[in-house]
Image (spheres, helix red, strand yellow):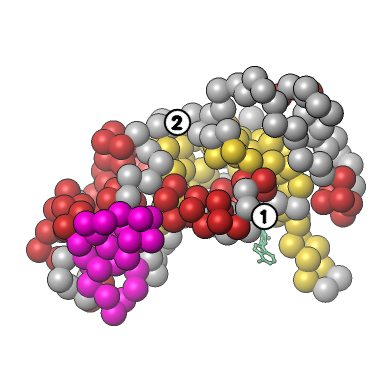
Amino acid sequence: MSGASAVERPWREPGSSSGAAKSLWREPERGGDEPDWPAVTFHDVFKIFRSGPVETVALRGLELRVQSGELVAVLGPSGCGKSTMLALLAALDEPSAGEVRAGSRSLQRLDDAELAAYRAREVALVFQSDNLWPALSARENIAVGLRLAGHGDASDAAQDALATFGLADRGAHRAGALSGGEQQRVAIAAAFARKAPLVLADEPTGELDAVNEQKVLEALGRLREEHGSTVLVVTHSGKVARAADRVVEMRDGVVLT
Ligand SMILES: Nc1ncnc2c1ncn2[C@@H]1O[C@H](COP(=O)(O)OP(=O)(O)OP(=O)(O)O)[C@@H](O)[C@H]1O
Ligand SMILES: [Mg+2]
């Protein structure tokens, strides 16, 4: 396979038996003439969960490309694979077959140290709730992530990020004592402080009222505007979808085209 170009890569053929998917997968060759990769690429991605005799095919040949700096809303019914997709992109889980790329890097090709660095430095996650260590202050929550990412002046940077999102006076508060909307903004402030290139939000406004939803939405927009972050936000909210650059609809483990 030496000299294989991007287009000649040995993708597994769609439609082949998903049960044998892993064994059929071969890593693409690293070509000398890499094309300009999008910020995010899913190519023919399958994810099969096995629990005893029960198989759940959460992703079945997912294709998605997201350009750098795009804010993409991901919509779809419960169980269609949205959270599974984010988990693969966050390198919290591995695909059963296919390829997940962050920029030019195929996540399956990274070793453990590279994956740890990727998670600490490049990806920020914002969930519907439980984003923070409740016993730590808002500032410490952000500072911990900054230290893991190798930043030196973590405490000052954490406070600056809180101020950016109108939370300067909440820095010393225990995170568990903040309102739901404030907690979500602290989680986004943490992504902001780290200048995370990739921000993955899974129903970040699901538990918020309209006012707080708007604030969280504006905060996500700032990540993109000020740091050029690429943002994927899973949502059931029409308001969030309307604020996105692009809406991607998922059904049964694939993106609708
Ligand atoms: N760890 C797991 N083990 C077994 N099955 C799983 C696991 N995680 C997800 N699934 C299954 O995979 C499918 C996709 O789940 P996923 O959580 O990605 O859906 P979703 O689109 O995020 O749904 P929701 O909108 O309800 O959050 C579902 O059928 C789910 O039950
Ligand atoms: Mg989900």
Hey, which quadrant is residue 27 in on the image? top right
Residue 66 x, y percent position in the rendering? 52, 33
Q: Give the residue at the far left of this rendering.
A: 169
Residue 61 x, y percent position in the rendering? 74, 41
Image quarter in which the C terminus is found? top right
- Residue pointed to by mark 1: 94
Image quarter in which the N terminus is found? top right
On whether residue 134 falls in the magenta region, the answer is: yes
Q: In the image, is 111 to the left or to the right of 119?
A: right
Q: Residue at x 69, y 41 (%)?
A: 99
Q: Residue at x 34, y 68 (%)?
A: 132
Task: From this view, report whether residue 31 is shown above or below residue 199.
Answer: above
Q: Earlier in the sequence, mark 2 or mark 1?
A: 2
Q: Amino acid at mark 1?
A: Glu
Badge 1 marks a residue whose secondary structure is: loop
- Residue pointed to by mark 2: 68
Q: In the image, is 98 to the left or to the right of 127?
A: right
Task: From this view, report whether residue 69 is shown above or below residue 55.
Answer: above
Residue 77 x, y percent position in the rendering? 58, 51
Badge 1 residue CB within 8 Å of ligand 1: no
On whether residue 156 falls in the magenta region, the answer is: no
Q: Amino acid at mark 2?
A: Ser
- Give the extent of the magenta segment: 132-155
Q: In the image, is 131 to the left or to the right of 11?
A: left
Badge 2 marks a residue whose secondary structure is: loop
Q: Nearer the viewer, residue 123 or 1?
A: 1
Q: Residue at x 73, y 38 (%)?
A: 44
Residue 53 shows in the view: yes
Task: From this view, report whether residue 156 is shown above or below residue 36.
Answer: below
Q: Residues within 10 Å of mark 1 (few under 14, many from 20)?
A: some
